[in-house]
Image: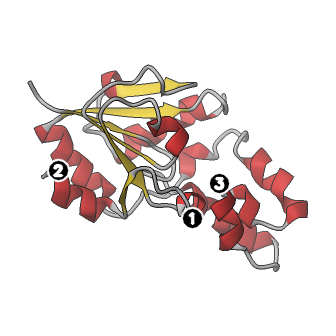
Amino acid sequence: MKKRIIVDMDEVMADVLGAMELWYKERYAAPIDYDRMKEGSLVKGFPEEVQPIMRQRLFEPGFFRHLPVMANSQEVLKAINDKYELFIVSAATEFPNSLKDKMEWLNDHFPFISWRQLVLCGDKKLVTGDVMIDDHGRNLVHFPGEKWLYHAPHNVLVTEYERVMDWEEIGKRLL
């Protein structure tokens, strides 16, 4: 039986922070405070008066549709998909407009991943497999298999899980 690999989308496959930074820098001059993101939220790195606007961006139609792809994720995930049982699992229902956006984004950038391999949910507690790659510890805590925390500014203080820095490292470990 093939190993089952579970992969999160946002900040693992899709560069949410990169999109937020680009949008912000086109409109505001104040610097982004990456140290404040260590508190567990990307939004906290933006000036306090702009944080509600940044959070609201996540609810806008099209935001998740046009995110940049994380470096090397396409090549590595293609090889993982050929070798393992791969599922993409995203806690997407908090942002209802993201459901369609995420499906279309995945079809554009990862056409080798079938709709049958995509799980859009509200909570990942029911997810099971051999390895889960996610940027949030709250999604890993109930997972029964190996828990890999994908490095991001908002999780640098999380130490309970095995950390992976990028897709190149994931490829070396799984392929």
Query: In the figure, is residue 105 to the left or right of 80?
Result: right
Residue type, mark 2 in image: Leu
Q: Is residue 1 above or below residue 163?
A: above
Give the residue at mark 2: 174
Q: CA distance from mark 2 to mark 1?
A: 24 Å
| Residue 91 percent coordinates (x, y) | 54, 32
Give the residue at mark 1: 153
Q: Are marks 1 and 3 in contact (CB under 8 Å)?
A: no
Q: Which mark is residue 40?
A: 3
Q: Looking at the image, which residue is at 51% across and 61% down?
A: 152
Q: Which label lies toward us, 2 or 3?
A: 3
Residue at the far right in the pictured view = 49
Where residue 37 sits, quadrant-wise, is: bottom right
Q: Are marks 2 and 3 in contact (CB under 8 Å)?
A: no
Q: Is residue 134 above or below residue 159?
A: above
| Residue 128 percent coordinates (x, y) | 33, 24
Residue type, mark 3 in image: Gly
Q: Secondary structure at mark 1?
A: helix
Q: CA distance from mark 1 to mark 3?
A: 8 Å
Q: Looking at the image, which residue is at 25% across and 48% down?
A: 77
Q: Earlier in the sequence, mark 1 or mark 3?
A: 3
Q: Secondary structure at mark 3?
A: loop
Where residue 36 sits, quadrant-wise, is: bottom right
Query: In the figure, is residue 91 to the left or right of 7?
Result: right
> In the rendered image, which quarter contains the N terminus?
top left
Depth check, front residue: 133 or 167 = 133
Query: In the figure, is residue 65 to the left or right of 54?
Result: left
